[in-house]
Amino acid sequence: MNIILLFPDDLQSPSHARLTGRRLTHVLEVHRAEEGDTLKVGLLDGNLGTGTVTRLDAEALELDLDLVAAPPPKLPLTLILALPRPKVLNRALIAASSLGIHRIVLLHTARVEKAYWGSPRMSEENLLHQRVLGLEQARDTVLPTLQIERRFRPFVEDRLPALASDSLRVVAHPGDHPPCPRAVEGPVTLVVGPEGGLVPFEIELLQVAGFQPVDLGPRILRVETALAALAGRMF
């Protein structure tokens, strides 16, 4: 982790925190810190700064905090992602969070297996944990919002138009389409389909909602690689 992310429950006062568990183990085994050392820290949905170690042993890590720096700005990007296979979901959430995407929607589509929704990786605890890992990687503190949509047509017809209002609307879809736009000024709503792509009916509904299919090139990319390529190209 490139920062130690603090949660409100970690705070014993506005300037002092006490940590246990995974973050304590990381500081002991990776940072190999000692009392008096300074670590990079950030408060969830708050500022970045430093924490000076005042206690470090097998039971707890305690830090005096100096949180004075604003987190990096989020990308004005809403990602609507067809729910990936469970083993891909974690990587996709980490990638999206570390890229600074500010809103993520996990969506059911025709080629998404219904069993994916019952995976333990869809637990609230895991969905939060993967986004936290992305923030720690990117030295960010602002958690991307996460929305779950299990029905494609009602979402696209009833809720997506308001969600995507005043934004450039694109759907990454291989084929004879215009190339993905570059250096966009302003917010973007991006739809990324599942393995095998979106079916024609889904593309048609998205086009009715104002989404333009765009092409990223001839290569087939992993989800997390495609997210990085799309975000880097558009912003």
Image: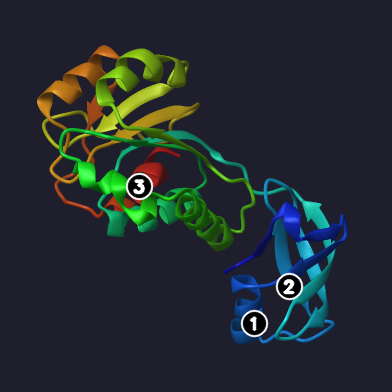
Q: Position of residue 139 (x, y in %)?
A: 61, 58
Q: Quadrant of residue 160?
A: top left
Residue 210 visible to the viewer = no
Kindly check if marks 1 and 2 are in contact, taking CB atoms under 8 A apart as contact: yes
**Local crowd size for mark 2, using a 10 Å CA cut-off: few (<14), some (14–19), many (≥20):** some
> Measuring 46% from the left and 34% from the top, which residue is drawn there?
77
Q: CA distance from mark 1 to mark 3?
A: 30 Å
Q: Quadrant of residue 193?
A: top left
Q: Earlier in the sequence, mark 1 or mark 2?
A: 1
Q: Which residue is mark 1?
A: 31
Q: Which residue is mark 2?
A: 39
Kindly check if marks 3 and 2 are in contact, taking CB atoms under 8 A apart as contact: no
Q: Give the amino acid type for the residue marked by disc 3 in the picture.
A: Leu
Q: Earlier in the sequence, mark 1 or mark 3?
A: 1
Residue at disc 1, secondary structure:
helix
Q: Give the amino acid type for the residue marked by disc 1 in the picture.
A: His
Q: Give the amino acid type for the residue marked by disc 2 in the picture.
A: Leu
Q: Position of residue 235 (x, y in %)?
A: 45, 39
Q: Quadrant of residue 83?
A: top left
Q: CA distance from mark 1 to mark 2?
A: 9 Å
Residue at disc 2, secondary structure:
strand
